Amino acid sequence: MNQTPGPVTATQALDAIVSTVPIEDANITQPVSSSPYALKEDPPIWADFRAILGPAGYHHPLNKLERFAFLDAARDHNVALTIATGEQRLYANILLQIGVVSPRLIQ
């Protein structure tokens, strides 16, 4: 995947993934809503996620999971692949559920 210098970003990884498998669901970590660190609006990377997922055929909202629910889902026994990138933007974690890959798409 890393064909360019420097660390791979979350959006580069997502772009590569959606070009090869159908996405059925996309989950993100919900920011805290009440603290000195609460965000007033969505993290900018979420717009990038939507811009990548939309043209790939995913036209649903990103599902916001509370932090610990997201972490539990990410370590579920059904998780098949984890990709760690060099992404440094806030709330850049995304958990994807992929669909069935047709054998003709693999060839």
Image (tube, helix red, strand yellow):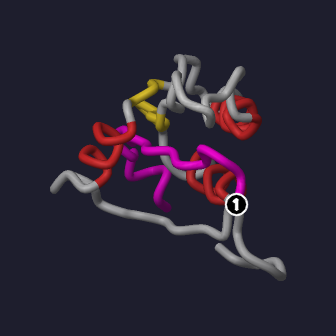
User: Taking 2 as reference, is 66 above or below it?
Assistant: above
Q: Amino acid at mark 1?
A: Gln
User: Taking 8 as reference, is 67 above or below it?
Assistant: above
* Residue 61 drawn at (x, y percent): 54, 18
Residue span colored magenta: 88-107
User: Taking 58 as reference, is 86 above or below it?
Assistant: below
Front-most of residues 64 and 77: 64
Seen at 32% across and 51% down, the residue is 74
Instruction: Say whether residue 20 is left or right of residue 96.
Output: right
Residue 44 picture quarter: top right
* Residue 24 drawn at (x, y percent): 41, 31
Residue 47 picture quarter: top right
* Residue 33 drawn at (x, y percent): 52, 23
Q: Residues within 10 Å of mark 1 (few under 14, many from 20)?
A: few
Seen at 66% across and 47% down, the residue is 90
Residue corresponding to mark 1: 88
Seen at 32% across and 48% down, the residue is 71
The number of discs equals 1
Instruction: Say whether residue 23 is left or right of residue 89.
Output: left
